[in-house]
Amino acid sequence: MKRILVIDDAMTVRMYYRQLLEAQGFVVEEAGNGYEGLEKALVGSFDLYIVDVNMPKMDGYTLLRTIRQEPSICATPAIMISTEGQAKDADAAYAAGANLYFQKPVRPETLILNVRLLTGEIAP
């Protein structure tokens, strides 16, 4: 089973993603901020990260830049999701190392399709 780490400071958002992804057969772990996410990423083995941008302690951009510099986890794909919807926000996400960027709220079918693509569950 593919393992996904959801990193978001909002518990309701994490629970929503967990329910949505577990219903599709994914194993989901959660982190409430960037530091906790980085710690879990370094000790766990994940197939995908779903990362919020605006979080206390360490924002999503900093988290992804850090992950991309860690040889053991740098190749794991990441979807960044934020309330920010301007082109500069997407550009910053991609510059930090995101594979995809979505503005909240993400349609469930869009998220599931892209999670399946990035984890290799379905071919592009």
Image: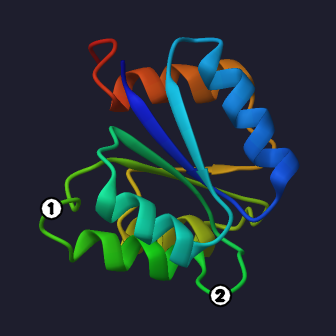
Label annotation for residue 72? 1
Q: Residue most toward the bottom?
A: 57
Q: Amino acid at mark 2?
A: Lys
Q: Position of residue 55 (x, y in %)?
A: 71, 76
Q: Residue most toward the right?
A: 12
* Label 2 CA crowd tier, 10 Å (few <14, some 14–19, many 20+): few
* Label 1 CA crowd tier, 10 Å (few <14, some 14–19, many 20+): few
Could you give the CA–CA distance between mark 1 and mark 2, rounded to whole angstroms? 23 Å
Is 46 positioned to the left or the right of 18 in the image? left
In the rendered image, which residue does mark 2 sit on? Answer: 57
Is 90 positioned to the left or the right of 115 in the image? right
Q: Position of residue 61 (x, y in %)?
A: 51, 77
- Classify 61 as above or below 118: below
| Quadrant showing the C terminus | top left
Quadrant hosting residue 107: top right
Residue shown at 57% from the left, 22% from the top = 112
Label annotation for residue 64? none
| Quadrant showing the N terminus | top left
